[in-house]
Amino acid sequence: MSENTEFHEEERTEIINGQVKVMGAQWTNHVLIKGNLYMIFGNYLDEKRPVALSGATVFLQEGVEEYKPDMAVIRNPDILGYDGVYGVPDLVIEILMPWTVLYDRGHKMKTYEKSGVREYWIVDPVNRSIEQYILENGAFILRNVYTHYTENTFHYLKDAEKAAVVTEFQCSLFDDLTIRVEDVFYRVID
């Protein structure tokens, strides 16, 4: 038995614009949200042809753009390889961390857009929000921002604001998949 019982998470890296970037460890809320999303898509896609992957490498341009999105949905099984995805996912979800915000909202988002990803979500654990972007005419268009309000926060909203809160939305890829915002943020720590 080893004397060193300390646990070290494997360093997560991505290749962004030809440079290796260390993405850092994931915080508890990040892991919880990722698990919630995997459950939502995994349960829905269980007997369907599309595949939901969490943390697999997506090779958009080998050696130049190699990402590990938090979640990817792939409807074409022909682009799945033993070590990752060799093609464009239909849906990509990135969960923000303080050190990934600029990439997730900047270069990576533009690369996903240029590559033809049909739908892109940015999930913000701090603000408990989901930004849903849909590809239209080669550009991501923000469809909406969905926010999960805690009871304490919801209490302070005005009646008109409460009435305008959207609690569920559709994934554009599947007509019969409704995402409940509270399910994405289930068990997230305040």
Image (cartoon, rainbow, N blue to C red):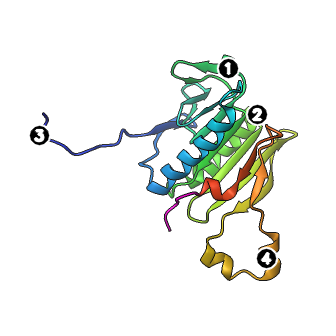
Above or below, 74 relative to 100: above
Does residue 50 appear left or right of residue 36 in this picture? right
Please give the range of residues in magenta.
186-190
Q: Mark 3 = which residue?
A: 3
Mark 1: which secondary structure?
helix
Mark 4: which secondary structure?
helix
Tag 4: Cα neighbours inside 10 Å, few (<14), some, or many (≥20)?
A: few
Q: Mark 2 = which residue?
A: 116
Which mark is nearer the camera, 1 or 2? 1
Q: Quick one: 141 or 127, which is closer to the camera?
A: 127
Image location (x, y in percent) of residue 118: 77, 37
Q: CA distance from mark 1 to mark 4?
A: 43 Å
N-terminal label among 3 and 2: 3
Which mark is nearer the camera, 3 or 2? 3
Q: Mark 4 = which residue?
A: 161
Magenta stretch containing residue 188, yes or no? yes
Which mark is nearer the camera, 2 or 4? 4
Q: CA distance from mark 4 to mark 3?
A: 57 Å
N-terminal label among 2 and 4: 2
Instruction: State the image quarter where residue 57 is shown.
Output: top right
- Res. 77 mark: 1
Amino acid type of the residue that numbered disc 4 sits on in the rendered structure: Glu
Whether label 4 touches label 3, CB < 8 Å: no
